[in-house]
Image (cartoon, grey):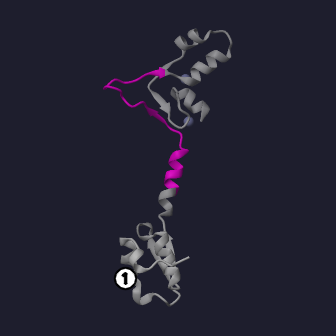
Amino acid sequence: MTRPTLGTLDKPGTVVVNLADSLLDEGRLIITDNFYTSVLLAEYLYGRKTDLCEVTDKSESVNIQKNISMHFLEQFDRQNGKIQRKRCHGCYSSLREDGQLSAEEAGKKAKKVNTHCKVCGHAYCLICYNKIH
Ligand SMILES: [Zn+2]
Ligand SMILES: [Zn+2]
């Protein structure tokens, strides 16, 4: 494999190398944020006995993960300025579970709500939401 030369590096990589040039060939570690990190740059620096270490914002990725699994009851987005209402999934299911009502009847009886849990993907009234979560 041929090592990349300075000429083959992308712009940010060249910037890093220019900045760090006096530090290269000394077995050092360079830390960059991910804007400056590229495979080519890492290989180039490796060829000059310098390790490249990427710093990523760990706290940010943790927050994103949390949001993905966070259940909360929120209102539907309005459509054409109108508040949407849907049948509460919890009420509907419990009405159907009794076996007394047809799907149509249960649908009519179940509470209509304008709130839902995006993670579950169902509309819930507050009572059902608290029951299920
Ligand atoms: Zn309900
Ligand atoms: Zn949920």
Q: Position of residue 107 (x, y in %)?
A: 54, 14
Foreground of the two, 70 or 53: 53
Please say whether residue 124 is one of the residues in the magenta stretch. Answer: no
Residue at 66%, 9% (x, y): give it. Answer: 100
Residue at 41%, 74% (x, y): give it. Answer: 9
Q: Residue furthest left?
A: 81
Q: Position of residue 57 (x, y in %)?
A: 47, 64
Quadrant that contains the C terminus: top right
Range of magenta residues: 62-86
Foreground of the two, 72 or 36: 36
In this rendering, position of residue 98 left or right of residue 1: right
Residue at 47%, 21% (x, y): give it. Answer: 86
Residue at 51%, 18% (x, y): give it. Answer: 111
Residue 19's place in the image compared with 13, above or below, is: below
Quadrant that contains the N terminus: bottom right
Please say whether residue 66 is one of the residues in the magenta stretch. Answer: yes
Secondary structure of residue under mark 1: helix
Q: Position of residue 67 (x, y in %)?
A: 50, 47
Q: Position of residue 96 (x, y in %)?
A: 64, 16
Residue 102's place in the image compared with 58, above or below, is: above
Does mark 1's beta carbon lie closer than 8 Å to ligand 2?
no
Q: Which residue is mark 1?
A: 19
Ligand 2 is found in which quarter of the picture? top right
In this rendering, position of residue 124 left or right of residue 35: right
The type of residue carrying mark 1 is Leu
The tally of labels here is 1
